């Protein structure tokens, strides 16, 4: 008999191989069981490569180093030229949006139009329910998509709505014309730091466009309230009503210094928030850079 393992030819019929020592019956049973098992699928190597290439990560870090400071510097230069009228038009859109959003949060109808935002004087609980429902629905979608950032934003907006509902609405709606422009412009600049998979980042024109629009609008409004005071738009807007500063001082009894201080404090708070976001953006972009395979050091330190 020929051994099925070592192929040694036995002259006599034996139960085990005289050369390699296997037991014929046991060896045959094992080989038959192995033949009946399904073929194992070849292992697919798991890639440990980063989702973002090293080149893209380094480019993103450079963007985050220079984008926001250069956008604010550009906006400051524009504020001293004839192009400031373009910045004024952009700021006007955010200004009227600030009036409208504040009115909606207080439960009043509002329609933002160029240079004026008509709004209701009395609270409508139907609008309160609609706005609350929209916020809750947005939060639910964020929770379903596991977007914690948007979920926290919806929660913050819900808290803000509660605060506006228990506060006098008249002066608040007026104040958050320019106040809303400062906040909304800050949010537009903050959109530059959206997650890499966000459409805001993938769309190059949209990302940089929002940054520039936010910077131009923010500095146009903020520089106005930094002074001088004779530049503040007191008086009456022809065919509309008194200007916002005149309404706040004449109708609601705010002093000029009190009004200016509140706008400057709000603008400063927005800048502080941008500074925190800027530092966080640098740290997160730096940590996201894959290591250089040819060096054990971090990519930015490899040349040292």
Image: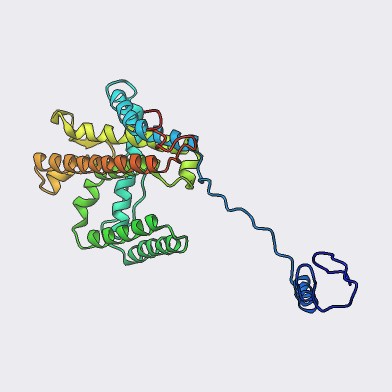
What is the quadrant of the C terminus in the image? top left
Q: Give left or right: position of 12 versus 201.
A: right
| Nearer to the camera, 203 or 283 | 283
When the figure is inspected, residue 114 is found, relative to residue 74, above or below; the finding is below
Q: Position of residue 231 (x, y in %)?
A: 18, 29
Q: How is the image coloured?
A: rainbow
What is the quadrant of the N terminus in the image? bottom right
Q: Give left or right: position of 140 versus 173.
A: right
When the figure is inspected, residue 243 is found, relative to residue 167, above or below; the finding is above
Q: Residue at x 30, y 27 (%)?
A: 73
Q: Give left or right: position of 258 versus 304.
A: left
Whether residue 49 is visible, yes or no, is yes
| Nearer to the camera, 14 or 30 | 14
Q: Residue at x 42, y 57 (%)?
A: 147
Whether residue 116 is visible, yes or no, is no
Q: How many marks?
A: 0
Q: Give left or right: position of 197 versus 119.
A: right
Q: Residue at x 24, y 58 (%)?
A: 164
Q: Residue at x 23, y 35 (%)?
A: 222
Quarter-wise, where is residue 143 in the image?
Answer: bottom left
């Amino acid at each position: 008999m020929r051994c099925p393992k070592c192929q040694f030819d036995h002259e006599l019929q034996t139960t085990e191989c005289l050369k390699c020592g296997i037991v014929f019956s046991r060896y045959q049973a094992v080989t038959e069981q192995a033949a009946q098992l399904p073929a194992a699928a070849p292992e697919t190597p798991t890639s440990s490569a980063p989702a973002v290439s090293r080149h893209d990560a380094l480019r993103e870090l450079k963007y985050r180093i220079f984008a926001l400071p250069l956008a604010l510097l550009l906006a400051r230069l524009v504020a001293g030229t004839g192009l400031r009228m373009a910045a004024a038009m952009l700021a006007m859109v955010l200004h009227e949006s600030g009036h409208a959003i504040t009115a909606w949060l207080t439960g009043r109808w509002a329609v933002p139009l160029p240079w004026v935002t008509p709004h209701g004087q009395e609270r409508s609980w139907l609008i309160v329910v609609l706005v609350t429902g929209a916020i809750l629905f947005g939060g639910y979608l964020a929770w379903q998509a596991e977007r914690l950032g948007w979920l926290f934003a919806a929660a913050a907006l819900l808290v803000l709505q509660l605060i506006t509902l228990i506060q006098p609405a008249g002066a608040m709606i007026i104040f958050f014309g320019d106040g809303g422009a400062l906040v909304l412009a800050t949010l537009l600049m903050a959109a530059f730091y959206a997650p890499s998979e966000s459409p805001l980042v993938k769309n190059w024109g949209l990302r940089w466009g929002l940054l520039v629009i936010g910077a131009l609008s923010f500095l146009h409004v903020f520089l106005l309230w930094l002074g001088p005071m004779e530049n503040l738009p007191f008086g009456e807007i022809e065919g509309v009503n008194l200007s916002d500063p005149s309404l706040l001082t004449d109708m609601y009894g705010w002093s000029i210094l009190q009004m200016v201080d509140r706008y400057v404090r709000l603008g400063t708070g927005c800048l502080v928030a941008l500074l925190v976001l800027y530092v966080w953006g640098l740290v997160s972009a730096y940590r996201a850079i894959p290591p250089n395979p040819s060096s054990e050091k971090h990519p930015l330190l490899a040349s040292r």
